Image: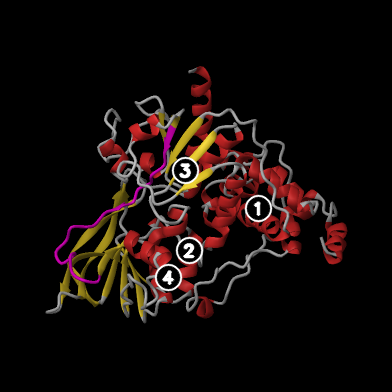
């Protein structure tokens, strides 16, 4: 720690009363300017300074019953890591995070804290802004990463029992980390050439830089977790092969990589693709480079259909690839959008156009089969549906014709079908997800546990990680009994 760090740490430690803490305004994350960042792929959020982090940590009121922990799917000891930041013990704060989270630097960036831990903060009852738990989590993890002193969580003595993990996304990585702590011999099998799953192929670097994911993965390697890429379980290796190789437990975290389309007229025109394909090609295959083996078309009038985080990632990527007009087309209003408020805010700042209460019903193309226009149905909001959001209702006779030369469809995903189709005996839902015991994440085949999108059908990074932790605890207990 530098002399300057020591000076402000002494000045700020334990200087505020509870009333003064509550009066301190919530920290604002520094960001790149919108019209600079929408032309580059560098991270938008720039992180907190040490001074900012300590001041924000001082806002924590030391609740007797810290309800923020209840909102965390991986049960991080939130008060403990925040109090360490307040004391200036940043490395210790990172160690606290790593006791329960395999991916603190990732979670600090992409988790919807506003709907989870921060939603449970006592400040809400006081009608004040909650403590910026996500910003502080990112700060502690990044501080450790840049310090040259990266801690490795303690692991139990090796027990020699082999455990396989299918998929290296957040569910698989979280599971692998906890099983390594229990002392198991863990191997993670990844179908793609990069480890990280959706963290690498599905989230752009302006939101989650690849090097951040790599640091977290290297930490798992230091704990003894092994990784094998370019390996498709269910194709190149079967579940029976894993059993024959001595694996005594299998966790399936293969995600939901099968895109959905709307099945409307013209949807097969050139220039219309799924958000999964678009983001994977750009993020993992250098597709934005015109000299790449698989370049992606760079549209000038780009429409992204959908209102989730993946839609925001896609439309903001299109802007960075040179789109003159980049649009979100969403059939409900902005209030019903499932995307994070921060992502919507960033998109608007970057010049993204929002066509809410519109839904595509047909696409038109030219003689070469390239999409040139989309016909939008104007919608209005009706009664709430099962999710609590108001249902979109057609406004009869009202349509709009919009010029487009690229359309990216982001209306949801379905579970990866490889494992469900290749393993007999698994119980599947009508959506193709693996059915598990919700308390243990154990499937109908006792040695197979599952979590994340292959069970949920599409969820957040942190919920997938929570599944991984829950499955690891249950599998450890199951193995010890058998």
The mark tally for this picture is 4
Q: Is residue 198 above or below residue 233?
A: below
Q: Secondary structure at mark 2?
A: helix
The span from disc 2 to disc 1 (Cα, nearest Å) is 19 Å
Q: Position of residue 248 (x, y in %)?
A: 45, 28
The span from disc 3 to disc 4 (Cα, nearest Å) is 32 Å
Q: Secondary structure at mark 3?
A: strand
The residue wearing badge 4 is 316
The answer to the question of whether label 3 and label 2 lie on touching residues, with beta carbons closer than 8 A, is no
Q: Is residue 342 above or below residue 176?
A: below
The span from disc 4 to disc 1 (Cα, nearest Å) is 28 Å
The boundaries of the magenta stretch are 250-271
The residue drawn where x is 72% and y is 63% is 52
The residue drawn where x is 73% and y is 46% is 61
In the rendered view, how is the structure colored?
A: secondary structure
| 224 magenta-colored | no
Crowd class of label 2 (few under 14; some 14 to 19; many from 20; radius 10 Å): some
The span from disc 1 to disc 3 (Cα, nearest Å) is 35 Å
| 257 magenta-colored | yes
The residue wearing badge 2 is 343
Q: Is residue 401 above or below residue 21?
A: below
The span from disc 2 to disc 4 (Cα, nearest Å) is 9 Å
């Amino acid at each position: 720690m530098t002399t300057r760090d020591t000076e402000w740490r002494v000045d700020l430690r334990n200087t505020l009363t509870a009333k003064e803490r509550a009066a301190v305004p919530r920290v604002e994350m520094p960001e790149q300017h919108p019209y600079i960042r929408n032309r580059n792929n560098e991270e938008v959020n720039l992180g907190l300074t040490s001074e900012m982090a300590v001041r924000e940590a001082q806002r924590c009121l030391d609740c007797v019953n810290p309800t923020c922990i209840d909102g965390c799917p991986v049960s991080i000891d939130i008060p403990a890591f925040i109090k360490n930041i307040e004391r200036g013990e940043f490395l210790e704060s990172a160690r606290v995070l790593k006791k329960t989270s395999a991916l603190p630097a990732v979670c600090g960036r992409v988790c919807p804290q506003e709907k989870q831990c921060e939603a449970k903060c006592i400040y809400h009852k006081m009608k004040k802004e909650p403590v910026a738990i996500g910003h502080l989590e990112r700060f502690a993890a990044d501080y450790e990463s840049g310090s040259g002193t990266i801690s490795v969580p303690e692991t139990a003595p090796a027990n020699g029992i082999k455990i396989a993990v299918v998929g290296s996304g957040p569910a698989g990585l979280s599971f692998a980390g906890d099983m390594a702590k229990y002392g198991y011999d863990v191997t993670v099998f990844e179908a793609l050439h990069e480890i990280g799953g959706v963290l690498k192929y599905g989230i752009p670097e302006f939101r989650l830089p690849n090097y951040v994911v790599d640091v977290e993965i290297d930490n798992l390697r230091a704990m003894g977790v092994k990784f094998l890429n370019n390996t498709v379980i269910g194709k190149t290796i079967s579940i029976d092969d894993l059993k024959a190789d001595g694996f005594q437990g299998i966790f399936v975290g293969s995600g939901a990589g099968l895109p959905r389309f709307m099945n409307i007229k013209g949807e097969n025109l050139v220039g219309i693709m799924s958000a999964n394909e678009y983001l994977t090609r750009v993020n993992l295959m250098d597709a934005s480079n015109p000299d790449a083996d698989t370049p992606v078309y760079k549209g000038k009038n780009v429409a992204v259909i959908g209102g989730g985080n993946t839609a925001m990632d896609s439309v903001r990527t299109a802007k960075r690839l040179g789109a003159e007009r980049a649009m979100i087309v969403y059939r409900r209003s902005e209030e019903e959008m499932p995307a994070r408020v921060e992502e919507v805010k960033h998109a608007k700042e970057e010049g993204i156009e929002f066509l809410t209460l519109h839904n595509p019903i047909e696409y038109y193309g030219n003689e070469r089969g390239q999409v040139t226009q989309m016909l939008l149905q104007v919608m209005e909001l009706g009664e709430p549906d099962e999710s609590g959001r108001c249902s979109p209702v057609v406004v009869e006779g009202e349509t709009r014709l919009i010029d487009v030369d690229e359309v990216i469809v982001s209306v949801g995903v379905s579970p990866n079908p490889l494992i469900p189709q290749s393993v007999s005996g698994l119980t599947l839902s009508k959506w193709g997800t693996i059915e598990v015991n919700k308390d243990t994440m154990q499937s109908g085949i006792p040695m197979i546990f599952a979590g994340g999108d292959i069970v949920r059908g599409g969820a957040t990074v942190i919920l997938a990680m929570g599944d991984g932790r829950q499955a690891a605890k249950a599998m450890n207990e199951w193995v010890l009994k058998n």
